[in-house]
Amino acid sequence: MTARLRSYTDVPPTADAAGEPEPLVAKQHTEPNPLPVFQLAVIYAIKLTLPITSTQSIPYFNLLIEKLAASEGAETGYYSGIAHTAFSITSFISMFAWGRISDSKGRVLVIFLGTAGTALFTLLFGLSTTFTGVLVNRLLGGFFHGITGAIHSVVGELSDETNQSTAFPLYDIISALGFVIGPLIGGTFADPAKEWPDVFTHPIWKTYPYLLPCLISAVISVVAALLSAFVLEETLPSKRKAKPFILEEEEPLLPEATTATVIDVAPTMADLEPLSIRELLSIPVLRAVFASSAVLGLAGSCYTNVFVLMAYTPLRQGGLAFSPAQIGRAISSMGAVSILLKLCMPRLLRRFGTLNMFDFCMVAWTATFAAMPFASFVAQRAAATATLLGGVDKDNLREVSGAEWSAVALVLFLSRLGCLAFSIIMILTRDHTPGSASLGTANGLAELAQSLATMVGPTVASSLFAWSATHHLLGGHLWVVFMLAQSGFGTWVARRIRKYRD
């Protein structure tokens, strides 16, 4: 891929009183290069399917595990954590492999295989009838979900240093949109035979109550696979068609006496020959970026699993006692907040700088975990006046008060500030990777580090929550101490990027 640098030099001379021209100091203005809008739209559409398929099960996941594992309340956390970890294990194992394959065989092949496999195992998840079946499905589904590094690389190769502050935040907005759509699909279409008994009368919907949201999500993934096969263009430097390198003069884009020069720079060897893993890991700042990706993945995975588990858990065990539909709305609103925040990211990155924003986002995780017990406290205070539906004395059938939604909104907002770091870490990886040919491997290593952390996070966080709630340790909030400690450590790790870069 050629790097295009557009600069403008003001040339009109000025004269002093004697008529002699004054010395001029050229003023350089860098203009962002135009992005390939159509191809970016294609890769964004493909990316959208991954969060949809991975989040559509969130609203009903603990109910499914409770039924299959014969557990109840917070104890379900032990089993749901294992299931989430199964997904993360194979994502971790496959992430680097997909990255290396994409660096040698091309991005398109990897993305097609990943989206097709995701479609298949999303559909099969809706047909699971045993806890063992869920575990096997999560293991195989995680393997095909490991293509995110290749997708990151396509975005990196379609953009450059002049326009990446637009391309990557928009890319992450797409992920946030998936977090809006996926939980809405799961919360709305779970158990359709119960919600719309006059429409879904076939016995299959009672036998497999969560098949419909999985079917809808699988169809979306099939569309993504078709886009990758027939529309997406290859961006791997060694596989794409060569473009001429020219020096040309363009029509003036600024006022008179101003010229614009466009320079197409030929790829260097670093753009064509990927570095080895050892060579990449020998770069201190890249090691710091990979470590930051790991602690970020740990914070994000711990939060997601604990929040959903807390939302499902009965009030008496320190939870919120939300129904699947309420959990779906909460998670979807979380994605909507992400979209609004990430729309502001290009300006924030230009105003405060990439590293300053990254440090701020890591601090936001500490505030998020500190606010979660507050939401539980508000829910318990509101429980006395909650209206039970249908006269059934069961926590998850109650009305949720406005005060509870406000407390939950605070937690969701703080977590979305923290999640801005996921798009920033992609920029940091791209900025510090020497050559685009190594970008797939570097992104794979960054994702590998995240996957390693997310492989541990769900089980540890969910088990700690279950243990704290069932034994009432520190009022059922012992898990908060762990979350605050790990998020504080993450902030320290993130600041090492600045140390090695400077």
Image: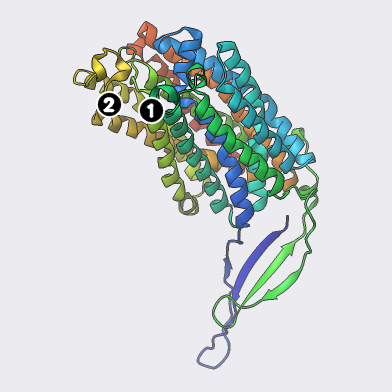
Above or below residue 494? Residue 23 is below
- Dot placed on the residue nearer the N-terminal end, 1 or 2: 1
Residue drawn where x is 48% and y is 44% of the image: 356
Circle 1 residues within 10 Å: few <14, some 14–19, many ≥20: some
Residue position marked by numbered label 1 in the rendering: 325
Residue 130 in view in this figure:
yes
How many angstroms separate mark 1 from mark 2 (CA)?
Answer: 12 Å
Work out which residue is located at the far bottom of the displayed protein and give it.
18
Residue position marked by numbered label 2 in the rendering: 400
Kind of residue indicated by mark 1: Ala
Above or below residue 460? Residue 257 is below
Residue drawn where x is 42% and y is 17% of the image: 479
Circle 2 residues within 10 Å: few <14, some 14–19, many ≥20: many
- In the rendering, which numbered label is found on residue 68? none
* Residue 76 located left or right of residue 101: left
The one of 112 and 158 positioned closer to us in this rendering: 112
Circle 1 SS class:
helix
Residue drawn where x is 61% and y is 20% of the image: 137
Q: Quadrant of the N terminus?
A: bottom right
Q: Position of residue 5 (x, y in %)?
A: 66, 63
Above or below residue 460? Residue 301 is below
Please report contact status of discs 1 and 2: CB closer than 8 Å, yes or no. no
Residue 502 in view in this figure:
no
Circle 2 SS class:
loop
Q: Quadrant of the C terminus?
A: top right
Identify the image quadrant of residue 402: top left
Q: Position of residue 355 (x, y in %)?
A: 52, 44
Residue drawn where x is 42% and y is 35% of the image: 332
Identify the image quadrant of residue 50: top right
* Residue 53 located left or right of residue 232: left
Q: Position of residue 188 (x, y in %)?
A: 42, 31
